Amino acid sequence: MPVSLQLLSQFTLLQPLPREALEPLSTRMNLRQFARRGMVMSKDSPVQELGFLVDGRLQGVDFTVDGRSVGMYFVDPGDYFGELSLVDGQPPSEFVVAAVKSTVAFLDATAARELILGHPALAQAVMVRLAQRVRTVMAQRTLLGLPNPFQRLCVLILQLPQRMVDGVAEIEQPPTHQELAIMINASRETVTRAFQLLFLHKVLVREGNALRLTQPVLLKDIAEGRADPPKA
Amino acid sequence: MPVSLQLLSQFTLLQPLPREALEPLSTRMNLRQFARRGMVMSKDSPVQELGFLVDGRLQGVDFTVDGRSVGMYFVDPGDYFGELSLVDGQPPSEFVVAAVKSTVAFLDATAARELILGHPALAQAVMVRLAQRVRTVMAQRTLLGLPNPFQRLCVLILQLPQRMVDGVAEIEQPPTHQELAIMINASRETVTRAFQLLFLHKVLVREGNALRLTQPVLLKDIAEGRADPPKA
């Protein structure tokens, strides 16, 4: 199924492209839908594609040699994934699964490589993205150097994208407890218990789908080991 | 101090360049020496440079919010570092310290950016390097999902570069116990004790500066949780 020009123009990576460059893409891309927990890109797949998320939410995950899942990153609408394999020709470095029902537009590897190498603005955007992925994974890796899961959770909460609402930092649509758990190497139960304590002591307040950081100094002190985690 | 053309031709990244492109570099680079444990590149430094290792060995390290050190990667002679900041303009993502006495040739950021963006072969090489760094850090991050430090050590040993000698895989110049410890979030003592057991049970054999993997199947079984770590 071809992808409309209007849809293509919503993909951040493609925004520097002139209309003439977008038109041939609309027929080379195809749309696929995935149910929640559906496998969008497998590590074992020999097929290389660049994926653009139309709607829904995806998560990049990997598994340890003994089968524990390890969370890597999220993909939100307008964003792309699969660029590692395009660049180095190796199989995907992780699995990409649908966190919720999602629609993805795929571009085959040959077309995607031509596109990126043919437009210096896109090549530079992909380089910056790769550099930022290195930084993100390094931050996660550093986070895991902390022995206490409560502390790891507080560091991770502070790393999530925030916006200020009435002078208080808010995290809109925070990841689920299960998603947070696999990002910090803890059980879902540990994350849920930690949130209960953070809510009880009003370090965090839930407001609809958002989390309000009502005591950011205390949260930072717990994250950096200067304050003990709150007790029941 | 200008850097000789002969030295420049030893840097892998620069090998696709013609002689005319190398000549102006030789006067723009400068050589600096570092004692063991010297700080080669600081996270806090506003100065952005691309570094090339002439001799010695460097380690990229970071620290958790509570001050524990976390190992990232090694730089060997001929290799380069500092590319993340060049690409995204952000401060360095980690500290680079000299693991042994080392000599480094530095190229300032402006010259390095012109060089990389002006030569598509270098731009592509940097993209591939970034992709590989993502993969390496993801593998380390996944490794840390394993609860048992002995198992993490065995996975890491299997990830180190190997070469075959008389039909047996060997790791030349393996990292020190301290270096391995900070890569797997364990104490130096835990790593030393694990090596003692692996030597005692002849899973590994030391041969000069090399480690011989004499029982690779058992090592893999321990790494993947199918066999218990050996006991004293």
Image (cartoon, coloured by chain):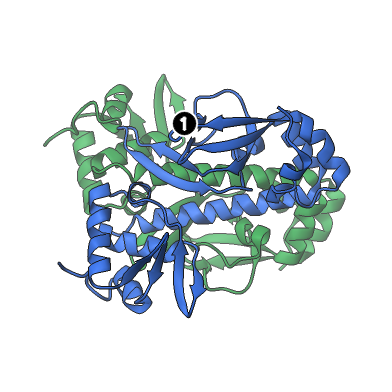
Chain colours: A blue, B green
Check disc 1 and report the residue beneath it. Answer: A38
Residue B124 lies in quadrant: top right
The furthest residue to the front? A208
Where residue A23 appears, as percent x and y from the top left, is 83, 37
Place of residue B207 in the rendered image (x, y in percent of width and height, measured from the top left): 34, 34
B163 displayed left or right of B196: right
Which quadrant of the figure has residue A192? bottom left
Q: Chain of mark 1?
A: A
User: In this rendering, is residue B130 above or below B111?
Assistant: above
Work out which quarter of the rendered image holds the N terminus of chain B and state it: bottom right
- What type is the residue that disc 1 sits on? Gly
The residue nearer to you, when weighing A18 against A112, is A18
Residue B53 at x, y = what percent? 59, 55
The quadrant of the picture occupied by the C terminus of chain B is top left
Residue drawn at (61%, 49%) of the image: A130
Image location of residue B79, percent across then percent down? 60, 49
State left or right for residue A110 relative to residue A160: right
Closer-to-camera residue (A97/B164):
A97
Can residue A190 be seen in this snapshot?
A: yes
Residue at position x 71%, y 43% in the image: A7
Residue A90 shows up from this direction: no
Looking at this rendering, what residue extends furthest in the left direction?
B232
Snapshot quadrant of residue B41: bottom right
Q: Secondary structure at mark 1?
A: loop
- Towards the viewer: B94 or A147: A147
Name the residue rendered at 32%, 32% in the picture.
A67
Compared to residue A51, the image places residue B129 above or below, namely below
In this rendering, position of residue A158 left or right of residue A107: left
Q: How many marks?
A: 1
